């Protein structure tokens, strides 16, 4: 297998019937001169660690690990609003909705997909014009489409920027108590930070993707807001 740190704004494979866009799989195959198999996916505007298989046999093995829920994933997310508690589990079934979206399922609804996401609040900023900001670590126990995004919205703590399930507008510096018209956060505030699984040798394997520059700058902007007294943190 190979692991890459996917940048935001890049699709893993072309969307069906969608607009043409640079595809990460095709770009990597051209760069490496070999065929690669897609094992799992990240949304276009989510950054972070992504795996590809280099052989059909490894593709089958990795698919078995994912399907058997033997792969642990951790995401970093910044939400607009406080989580229900400092740590917990969002256990809410999801259901396909229109235009490729997902939504919380009604009790007993046919076609509902069991979905669980564990979370832990890492830090919280209060007093900003944009409201309470929370940095959380989210660990999905199931792998439903848009699971983390829908689950966070369901507890009234959507991602800071999420055109589909929250606010589409970028976060501006003015919302952090600064003057000017600079953008503090301009894309989906979700990053696949860590993945753990068993390698083909049987050894435990953990892979981490560092924060990309834009999310590192967002963290720095929040730290600056605390220093300027624009908010409090805990």
Image (cartoon, rainbow, N blue to C red):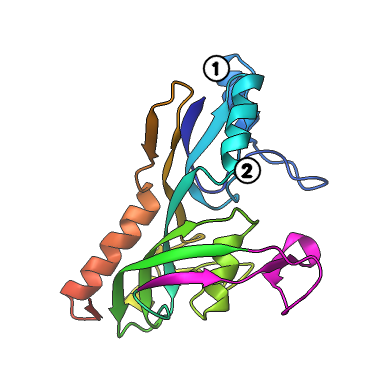
Q: Element at badge 1?
A: helix
**Identity of the residue drawn at 38% across and 55% down:** 215
Spot occupied by residue 44 in the image (x, y as percentages of width and height): 60, 49
From the viewer's perspective, is residue 215 above or below residue 2?
A: below
| Residue 60 found in image quarter | top right
Residue 48 is situated, as x and y percent measured from the top left of the image, at 46, 45
Residue 28 placed where, x, y %? Answer: 57, 25
Residue 32's tag is: 1
Which is more toward the observer, 87 or 52? Answer: 87
**In which quadrant of the rendered view does residue 61 lie?**
top right
Question: Horizontal and vertical percent for residue 168?
Answer: 58, 70
**Front in this rendered view, residue 226 or 113:** 113
Task: Give the extent of the magenta segment.
Answer: 87-114
For image coordinates 24% across by 81% down, the residue present is 230
Q: Residues within 10 Å of mark 1 (few under 14, many from 20)?
A: few
Residue at the limit of the structure toward the top, as seen here: 33
Q: Is residue 174 visible?
A: no
The answer to whether residue 234 of the structure is visible from this angle is yes
Indicate yes or no whether the magenta region holds residue 95. Answer: yes
Residue wearing tag 2: 67
In reply to whether residue 68 is colored magenta, the answer given is no
Q: Residue at x 51, y 60 (%)?
A: 188
Residue 175: mark in rendering: none
Give the Cα distance between marks 2 and 1: 28 Å
The C terminus - image quarter: bottom left
Residue at figure coordinates x 52%, y 24% from the top left: 1
Question: 90 above or below 64?
Answer: below
Q: Is residue 89 left or right of residue 150?
A: left
Q: Nearer the viewer, residue 188 or 102?
A: 102
């Amino acid at each position: 297998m190979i692991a890459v740190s996917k940048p935001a704004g890049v699709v893993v494979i072309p969307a069906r019937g969608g607009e043409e866009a640079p595809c990460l799989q095709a770009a990597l195959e051209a760069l490496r001169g070999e065929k690669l198999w897609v094992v799992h996916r990240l949304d276009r505007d989510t950054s972070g660690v992504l795996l590809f298989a280099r052989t059909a046999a490894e593709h089958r093995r990795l698919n078995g690990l994912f399907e058997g829920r033997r792969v642990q994933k951790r995401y970093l997310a910044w939400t607009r609003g406080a989580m229900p508690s400092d740590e917990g589990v969002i256990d809410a079934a999801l259901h396909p909705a229109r235009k490729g979206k997902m939504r919380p399922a009604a009790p007993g609804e046919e076609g509902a997909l069991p979905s669980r996401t564990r979370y832990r609040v890492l830090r919280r900023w209060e007093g900003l014009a944009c409201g309470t900001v929370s940095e959380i670590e989210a660990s999905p126990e199931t792998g439903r489409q848009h699971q983390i995004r829908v689950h966070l919205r369901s507890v009234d703590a959507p991602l800071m920027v999420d055109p589909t399930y929250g606010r589409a507008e970028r976060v501006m510096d003015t919302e952090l108590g600064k003057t000017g018209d600079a953008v503090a956060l301009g894309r989906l505030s979700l990053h696949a930070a860590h993945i753990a699984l068993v390698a083909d040798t049987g050894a435990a394997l953990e892979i981490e993707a560092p924060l990309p520059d834009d999310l590192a700058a967002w963290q720095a902007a929040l730290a600056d807001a605390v220093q300027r007294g624009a908010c409090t943190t805990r």
